[in-house]
Amino acid sequence: MNEDQARDERTSGGVSPGPVRLRRLRFSPGMRALVKETDLLASDLIYPLFIRPGVGVKKPIVSMPGQFQWSPDTVVEEAAAAAELGVPAVILFGIPDFKDSCGSGNLDPDGPVPSATRALKKELPELVVMSDMCFCEYTEHGHCGAVNLAAEAHYRADLPEGYLLNDHTLELLGRASVVHASAGADVIAPSGMIDGMVGAIRAALDAAGQEHIAIMSYAAKFASAFYGPFRDAAESPPQFGDRAQYQMDPANWRQALREVELDVAEGADIVMVKPAMPYLDVIRAVRAACNLPLAAYQVSGEYSMIHAAAANGWLDLQGCALESLVGIRRAGADMIITYFAKDVARWLA
Ligand SMILES: [Zn+2]
C-alpha cells in the first residue's frame, strides 16, 4: 500500500467496495427476469405469407425451410395457427399467374392478395392484414413499377431507356392500394422505394373513403444481397439491371433518416427499416429521430442462413432465431416482420 492508498483507506473508514459484481444480477432466473431490459413477445411479430392463385396450394419454398406458397384457402389455416399463438398480424405477398410490363395483375380485385385478404378477414376478423404494395411480383421485367421502354405507351424520350418511371408508378400504386383496401386490408405497406409513394397512396385511399386504412412504409429499404431467397419465393428477380436506382445504398444511414422524414411528412403511420440484422445501427438511429412506431424486417436471407447453419449442425436454430429477434428489438424496433413468427410464438408459449 502506498501513501495515497493508505490515505484513501483512512478517509473511507477502511471499507473497500471490492470488485463490482454485476453477476449478482444474473444469479437466479428470477433475478435475471427482474433486470431484463428488452422483451420479445408474440404480439411484436408480423408473419409474412406468399399467396398464389388456386385451391389447396401448399408449395414448399426450397430456399426457405418451413415456408410455403399458399392459395387463398390454405393460407387461412396457416394464419389461424399463428393467430392462435398470439401473432397479431400477417403481411401478404402476391405471386400472380400472369405478368405484364406495368404489373396490371396488382390492380385485379380477384388477384391472389385481395382474394386471400377477403378469406382471412372473413374467418379471422381480428387479424391485422397488411398488404405489401409493390409491382415487382406483377411485372414481367421484375422492377418495382412501370419502366421506360420504347414499346410502351407511357414512353418518355427525355428519360433513359429502362428508367423506373416514378410518377407513373405513383398513380398505379394509388389505384392498387384502393383495390387491396377494398378487399379488407387493414394496412397498405408500400415497399418499392418510389419517391412520393406514401403521399400518393394516402391521397388515393382518402379519395376512396378509406381514411381509416393505415400506411406502413418501407421507408429505409436497402439494396441488399440478403433478399436472395425471397426472390425465389416471390418469383420476382429483375430481368435486367438491378434495384440500386431506387433502393438505398447499404453504406448510407443519414440518407435513411431523410427517407424516414419524408415518409413521415407524407403521412406514414408506421415506418420500417429493411433488412434488420445488417442495419441495427439504422434501426437505432431511426428510433432516436422519429416517434412513429418502427418496424424492422428480418428478411429471407437472415432467416435462411440461420436455417442453413442449423441444418449443418453449426448453430442452434431456436437459440439463434430468438437472439436475432431480441437484438432487433433492443436496437429499437417495436415490431418485427419475420418468417420465424409462428415458430417463435410457439417457443415463447
Ligand atoms: Zn418491389
Image (tube, helix red, strand yellow):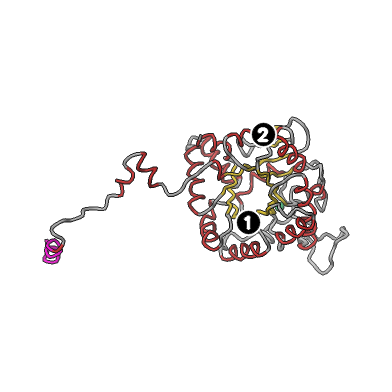
Residue 254 vertical placement versus 231 (above, below): below
Please name which of the two marks, 1 or 2, marks the residue nearer to the observer: 1
Label number found at residue 60: 2
Q: Which picture quadrant has residue 286?
A: bottom right
Label number found at residue 221: 1
Residue 282: image location, x then y, percent: 54, 59
Query: What's the residue type where badge 1 is placed?
Result: Lys
Q: Which picture quadrant has residue 250?
A: bottom right
Mark 2 lies on a secondary structure that is strand
Q: Is residue 153 shown left or right of residue 241?
A: right
Is 14 within the magenta? no
Q: Residue at x 73, y 55 (%)?
A: 211
Q: Nearer the viewer, residue 16 or 309?
A: 16
Q: Give the class, few, some or many, for how many residues have Cα within 10 Å of label 2's Cα (few <14, many ≥20).
A: some
Query: What's the residue type where badge 2 is placed?
Result: Pro
Label number found at residue 236: none
The part of the chain drawn in magenta is: 1-10
Q: Is residue 263 visible?
A: yes
